[in-house]
């Protein structure tokens, strides 16, 4: 049997889908948690959208609850609305909704130049760091227990 290796420096959605499908199949076979998370009702989205007086989006949070975890995917809002407690309110609201949906912990990622100190001020801890990513900065994985009294 002879194999062939092809190098492509272009995006290839069909190949990316193929690899993603094969990885999902492998994970489903070896992890009941992965298999169950693929069921439509297992992943519970949370989207909090903030609008201005004119109804235009100025920011918000997208997140998901699965495996009893809240994963914050994106959290941003316009700089003109920062510094007045809006971020605190959005994060707290997201955590409260996640608790109602059964989450016990939260995970998120952030760059050094983004919001590490903001998250730390809300009880998040750095559990992983990739240094010099991007060059001169770091990339952090942060977690928080939503039931710190049980730890």
Image (cartoon, rainbow, N blue to C red):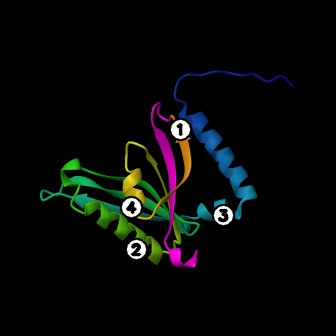
Q: Around disc 1, counting alpha carbons within 10 Å, would you say few (fewer than 14), some (14 to 19), or many (20 or more)?
A: few
Q: Can you identify the residue that label 2 sits on?
A: 96
In the rendered structure, the answer to whether residue 12 lies left or right of residue 116 reads right
Q: Can you identify the residue that label 4 sits on?
A: 121
- Between the C-alphas of marks 2 and 3, the distance is 23 Å
| Image quarter of residue 81 | bottom left
Q: Can you identify the residue that label 1 sits on?
A: 131
Q: Which marked residue is nearer to the observer: mark 2 or mark 3? A: 2
Q: Earlier in the sequence, mark 4 or mark 1?
A: 4
The x, y position of residue 119, in whole percent, is: 40, 58
The x, y position of residue 149, in whole percent, is: 52, 78
Q: Which marked residue is nearer to the observer: mark 4 or mark 3? A: 4
Q: Residue at x 53, y 67 (%)?
A: 105
Q: Earlier in the sequence, mark 2 or mark 3?
A: 3
Taking depth in this image into account, of 106 and 6 the one nearest to the observer is 106
- Marks 4/3 in contact by CB < 8 Å: the verdict is no
Residue stretch in magenta = 133-151
Q: Which marked residue is nearer to the observer: mark 1 or mark 2? A: 1
- Between the C-alphas of marks 4 and 3, the distance is 31 Å
Q: Can you identify the residue that label 3 sits on?
A: 33
Please identify the residue farthest to the left as the structure is shown.
54
Quadrant where the image shows the C terminus: bottom right
Q: Which marked residue is nearer to the observer: mark 1 or mark 3? A: 1
């Amino acid at each position: 049997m002879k194999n062939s290796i092809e190098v492509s420096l272009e995006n290839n959605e069909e190949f990316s889908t193929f690899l993603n499908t094969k990885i999902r199949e492998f994970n489903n076979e070896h992890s009941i948690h992965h298999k169950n998370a693929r069921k439509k009702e297992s992943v519970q989205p949370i989207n909090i959208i903030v609008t201005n007086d004119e109804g235009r989006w100025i920011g918000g949070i997208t997140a998901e609850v699965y495996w009893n975890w809240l994963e914050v995917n994106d959290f941003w809002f316009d700089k003109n609305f920062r510094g007045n407690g809006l971020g605190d309110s959005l994060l707290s609201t997201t955590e409260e909704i996640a608790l109602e949906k059964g989450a016990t912990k939260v995970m998120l990622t952030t760059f050094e130049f983004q919001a590490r100190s903001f998250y730390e001020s809300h009880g998040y801890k750095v559990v992983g760091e990739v240094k010099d990513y991007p060059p001169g900065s770091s990339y952090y994985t942060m977690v928080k227990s939503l039931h710190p009294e049980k730890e």
